[in-house]
Amino acid sequence: MRILSGVIVSFFAVFILCACTIYDKIFDNPVDFKANEEQGIEAATLVFYPKSQTLTQADSILVGSFIVFKEDSTEPFAGLHLKIEFPNDLIELDTILPGQFITDTSQSTPLFTYNYEDGNTVDIYAYFLGTTKLDLDGTGHLADLVFNPLASGSDSIHYDLSECTFIDHLDSEINVRGIRGAEIIIQ
Amino acid sequence: MKVLIYHIIFLSTIVLAFDQDATYLVLNHFDKPLPGIDQTLVDNFNNSSFNFDHSVDVLFDDLDKDDNPASKYMNDIKDLGVTHSVNFVLLNKIKHIDERLIIEGMLFNTRSGGLIHRRKINVKNYDNGSINEISLWVGETKNQIQKEWEKERESIMFLNPEEISYDKTPMGAALRSLVVPGWGQAYSGNSISAGLWAVLELSLSLAFISSYNNYDSSSKSYLQNRRLYDATDDEKEVSAYRASAEKDWDDHVMYSKLAIALASTTITGWVSNSVHAWVFGPRPYTNIYQKGMPQSTIPKG
């Protein structure tokens, strides 16, 4: 009886101490301007989504390029130039597609082109050609980049902020204050 | 040699003086009638004179609560001595509490008014021994105990009290309360206390379970919303999942603290309940047989 009582009380105490775990409050989605601010990266921010991915050599690597504005201080834009650097010893560029944001969710066909010459950088140029509006406003998907693995390892792709430009329909430049790269792990 | 002879003469004088001229006013306060007790005393102690007065019934209550019980009723005793022309007042009280028989005897000297002899007996299932015990008690005060009275007492007493094993023990009560709150108190026969402990612990346990369930659902909801938050690249969904996850996080912290506080209170109460069951657990009502004057009631001065 004594052993049983001891076991009951001990079990109860251990159960409570172990059961009531407080989870870490972690929010780190690159598309979330609050998460970027928490990391000291101001909006407007150029980011990749997902921020990290682990793949095998048989997989294709899909990375989305996004512009993230703060909810209450968006700036309309119409054209953009992105300069993206990637580790060409680890991955090779396969395809670049326009994002849903600049195609106005597939309602319009933007001017979209890119320049890639077998190096580790790619330049993407796009201009919004909407039928009912001149500019895009807010956070959105700019492009999808598809890569193929070349070797095993890990590295990151990132923007060259000094070469990235955003303009509105009057050719006024929009100030991009921050960038976030994306980690790629090939197993 | 002369000194020894003087002592013998002195003691004999005292004994003869007490025995031959002892007159008693007997006050019997019984909660149940005890037929034949008056005549039994007269027959057993025929060298003494007994007066019986059943009208005095307000004296001698709560004697133990008084600072000086031996002299509390000094003047009343002296008055009774003068009124009834007796040397001693002999009070016999018999009470029945549940199955227990409590016999209390007091002997007062009417010349001084003080309590000179007292005895308490508290036994179980001894109804038929009341007359025998009163005879023994009076016999003790007069030093006239007959063998058959002692044999009758021995016939109902445990010869080896140390061999008595108790069916119920304080430890048994404590362990039962540790398993189920209130069980130990119920086992000790205290149903009110048992109910209170059971309700208290049940309420605390239910409050804890409720808090823990809320904590658990908040935690799961937080993890789910965080997974969805991480899995989407849609700005509006990200914002919505984050808001939900933040609310769930705050809730899971609050319910966690509440659950731990309630669990601590429940465990503390549970252990206290066990200690309470042990402290107020089943023990012998009092000594099986108590002879003579208890220490706490020894007259002061």
Image (spheres, grey):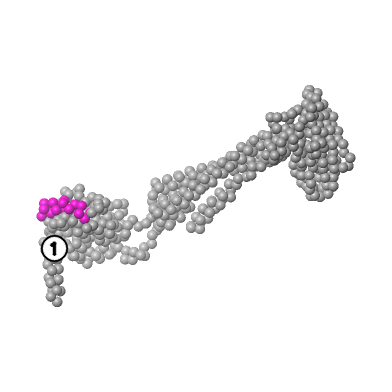
Q: Chain of mark 1?
A: B
**A113 left or right of B119 in image:** right
Residue B180: x and y, percent?
47, 50
**Amino acid identity at mark 1:** Phe
| Helix, strand or loop for the magenta stretch, by majority | helix
- Residue numbers of the magenta segment: B69-85
In the image, what residue occupies the spot 81% across and 45% down? A59
**B236 left or right of A82 in image:** left
Residue placed most toward the observer, A111 or B288: A111
Q: What element does badge 1 sit on?
A: helix
Position of the C terminus of chain B by quadrant: bottom left
Residue B152: x and y, percent?
25, 63
Q: Quadrant of residue B298?
A: bottom left
Residue placed most toward the observer, B130 or A130: A130
Residue A176: x and y, percent?
76, 34
Up-down relation of residue B5 to residue A9 (above or below): below
In the rendered image, the residue lying farthest to the bottom is B1
In the rendered image, the residue lying farthest to the front is A162
Residue placed most toward the observer, A66 or A99: A66
Up-down relation of residue A141 to residue B126 (above or below): above
In the image, what residue occupies the spot 21% across and 59% down? B117
